[in-house]
Amino acid sequence: METWRIVATGLFGAGGLVMTLVAMAQVRDRRRSTHAEVVRAGLISLGIVAVLALLVATILPSVAAWGLVAATAFAVFFLTMMD
């Protein structure tokens, strides 16, 4: 496995975990949301992050992989700085 794939997967995974926590917090902040809804949002988010991280690590071309990492970084920045 190439070094750039390992780095891109690690960066995407870190950003994906932050995005998962943000998604769970947004679900929690909704009125009348239950614990099960928060857990479900977290599991769905982690599943999506895991599938995309696997794609970055294995088959995505470098431009697409780094584009996904950059999009995740921008999303994390804007979602965490807006509140």
Image: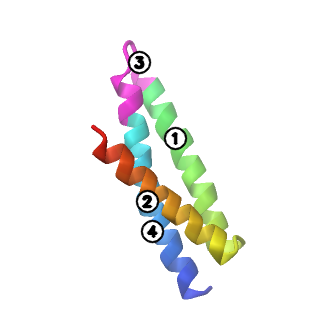
Q: Which residue is mark 1?
A: 43
The residue shown at (41%, 61%) is 14
Q: Disc 4 vs disc 2: Cβ atoms closer than 8 Å?
A: yes
| Magenta stretch holds residue 35 | yes
Residue type beneath disc 2: Ala
- Of callouts 3 and 4, the N-terminal one: 4
> In x, y percent, where is residue 81?
29, 46
Image quadrant containing the N terminus: bottom right
Mark 1 residue element? helix
Q: Position of residue 73 (x, y in %)?
A: 43, 59
Evaluate if marks 3 and 1 touch, with contact meaning CB atoms under 8 Å apart.
no
- The residue at which mark 4 appears reads as 11
- Amino acid under disc 1: Leu
Q: CA distance from mark 2 to mark 3?
A: 28 Å
| Residue indicated by mark 3 | 33
Q: Which residues are magenta?
A: 25-36
The residues bearing labels 2 and 1 have C-alpha atoms spaced at a distance of 21 Å
Res. 73 mark: 2
- Outermost residue to the top: 32
